[in-house]
Amino acid sequence: MIIVGGEALIDLVPAPAGGPRAWRALPGGSPANTAVAAARLGHPTGFLARLSTDVFGEEIRGHLADSGVRLDRVTEAAEPSTLAVVSTDANGAATYGFYTEGTSDFGWLPHELPRLPADCDAVHVGSLAAVLEPAAAVYTDVVASAGPETVRSFDPNVRPGLGVGRADYRDRTETWVAASDLVRTSDEDLRWLYPYDDPLTAAARWAEAGPAVVVVSLGGEGVTAVSRGGQVHVDAEPVVVADTVGAGDSFSAGLLVALAERGVLARSALAALGRADLRACLAFAARVAAITCSRPGADPPWRAEIDAVLEEFRG
């Protein structure tokens, strides 16, 4: 079982050009996207979050359930759903503005505090819920309660438009990194957090702080994994990019599932992971992310799609 904790929100995405200015309301949120992607890849996946009972919350709940995500650790909330306004540039890169004040994702109450199931192999947390209180404190406690072999996975998914100052954002992120075994980030995240450092240099510092593996997505240049044993690089999958919404989330899910299928989704196994196994897991995750980039919005592939691509590649 992989448990993903964090926000599930509504992305307001611009409708295709050519008509009146309009927006599509699509279920999103980095942790929710990761849960959807992992479940669609066929791995038992649960979501640990606080969802509104409003119409958007029902849409989010249906989207998660339809993708096979288990919702028995979702808390119902009266507050409205969180909104993100998405814009994309000519290359499909997305930027976000957020409406988070008084919304369901971040208003945890003491009696609602969740716990991990006993069969949890990995707990993945990230994005807004890792930096906005009281959600950040709740998920910190959840991760601290994980079993001795449960992999702690973190994706900062930095959002400058959130309104958190750079120094504060950096401090909170570094606290999460130090408590994690596996970190997935991007060169853009690292450039914003450390504007005077090379991203891979910053990632190497993170690897020295605690994680067994720090993976850095480099856009069209592929991905590089940094560990105390060195670096492993995998080139990007060739793809016609529709947009990059949900690509990093899909990568995180693909990496966790690939590790699980190789029998190394455990803290001791991850610490001893060899370069060949790590490269194979990165390649699988890159393929999952590439398919997500090939279509609009956060629409991760199903396992049958991945298997079809792999079969074609082998042929």
Image: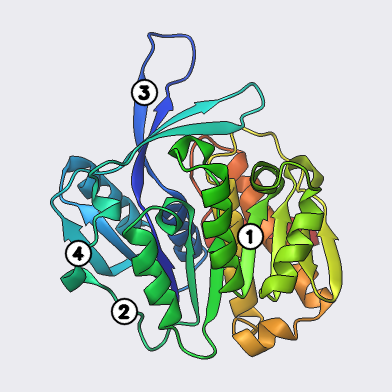
Q: Which residue is at a point 34% across and 60% down the rendered structure image?
A: 135
Cβ atoms at labels 2 and 1 below 8 Å apart: no
- Disc 1 marks a residue whose amino acid type is Arg
**Which mark lies nearer to you, 1 or 4?**
4
Give the labeled residue for mark 1: 184
Q: Earlier in the sequence, mark 1 or mark 4?
A: 4
Residue 248 image position (x, y, % from top left): 59, 51
- Disc 2 marks a residue whose amino acid type is Arg
Q: Quadrant of the N terminus?
A: bottom left
Front-lying residue, 296 or 305: 296
Q: Quadrant of residue 98?
A: top left
Q: CA distance from mark 1 to mark 4?
A: 29 Å
Q: Quadrant of residue 251?
A: bottom right
Q: Quadrant of the C terminus?
A: bottom right
Q: Which residue is at a point 65% across and 42% down the rendered structure image?
A: 192
Residue 47 image position (x, y, % from top left): 36, 66
Q: Which residue is at a point 45% across and 53% down the rendered structure image?
A: 33
Res. 23 mark: 3
